[in-house]
Amino acid sequence: MLEKIKETAGFIKNIIQDTPDFAIVLGSGLGKLKDEVEPIHILEYPEIPNFPQTTVAGHGGQLIYGKLEGKKVLMMSGRFHYYEGHNIQTIVFPFRVFHLLGIKNLILSNAAGGVNPAFNVADVMIINDHINMMPEHPLRGKNLDELGPRFVDMSEPYNKKMIEVALNVAKDLGIKAHQGCYVALQGPTFETPAEYGMIKAIGGDAVGMSTVPEVIVAKHQGMDCFGISIITDVGGPDIAFTVSHEEVLQAADKAMPNVIKIVKGLVKNYNA
Ligand code: HPA
């Protein structure tokens, strides 16, 4: 495993010849950020040795290295979800490579269902904590000592300074941004009313199917993380709204300009 991670990192390093300031995952809600980066190198996933391959026909996935707000960023366009059937090690592989590339900061976005009654569809929530309810842990098994310790401190899963910078950016731009706890389930079903009730009861504000495995692996390696969710629907024990993928995508599109503004402001103003 370590050899593969090193081989992939070596391949990418050889091309980009630099250390990016941020890795950014273009999840739902950030896809169009791709159009705002000044690309320097575009690597197709199938060209990158050992890199996971997407299951979506016609969308092979790209790693884009370029400049955003004057900073060096490596963007992952096309991400991997557990519900697609990927092994959890496949999902986190790119993030181990990012560490070997020397990247210190990770930014992720996602679409999530809101259970906090203060949340409305198309709101944004800056993630300040998470609860991992995925069925598999990415650090289970022999520890990769070269990457990080066996037992990982998770007292600050989402970097407080990045959250503060992002909140200030949102405030200055007049964008309402909530903060909250993201609960990760495997999906692919959306939650039942009783499951939404459970998410709320255990202290969650939003629920989704991604992000947490990536953050765990990043923290193992000492990276700082920032996560932002678009609330694409709201649920609860006594709310029987239906949710469809189309509605999720529509809400994500509606909120995307705000998420992009916040992330651009964060990249510009955060100096770690
Ligand atoms: N659960 C509920 N609603 C959602 C999700 C989810 O995982 N993702 C986007 N909207």
Image (cartoon, rainbow, N blue to C red):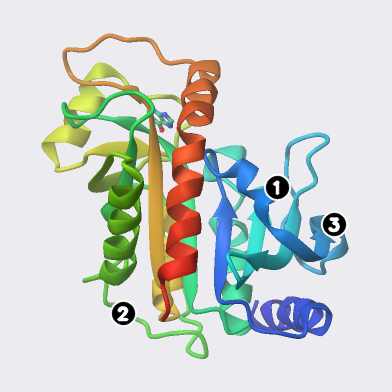
Residue 131, visible in the rendered structure: no
Mark 1, secondary structure of its residue: helix
Mark 2 or mark 1, whichever is nearer to me: 1
Mark 2 and mark 1: Cα distance apart in space: 39 Å
Badge 2 is on which residue? 151
What amino acid is labelled 3 in the image?
Answer: Pro
Q: Disc 2, ligand 1: is the CB inside 8 Å?
A: no
Q: The residue tagged with tag 3: helix, strand or loop? A: helix
Instruction: Give the quadrant of the C terminus.
Output: bottom left
Decide which of tag 2 and tag 1 comes sooner along the chain. 1
Residue located at (73% from left, 61% from top):
38
On screen, residue 177 above or below 189: below
Q: Is label 3 or label 2 in front?
A: 3
* Residue denoted by label 3: 46
Residue type highlighted by circle 2:
Phe
Question: Residue 44 at x, y = what percent?
Answer: 83, 57
Q: Is residue 220 above or below residue 36?
A: below
Q: Quadrant of the N terminus?
A: bottom right
In terms of image quadrants, where is residue 124? top left
Disc 1 residue type (three-letter): Asp
Residue at which label 1 appears: 35
Q: Which mark is residue 67?
A: none
The answer, for residue 149, to whether it is visible in the render is: yes
Q: Earlier in the sequence, mark 3 or mark 2?
A: 3
Task: State the separation of the CA atoms marked 3 and 2.
Answer: 34 Å
Compared to 114, does 55 lie above or below? below
Tag 2 secondary structure: loop
The picture places residue 159, in percent across and down from the top left corner, at: 31, 69
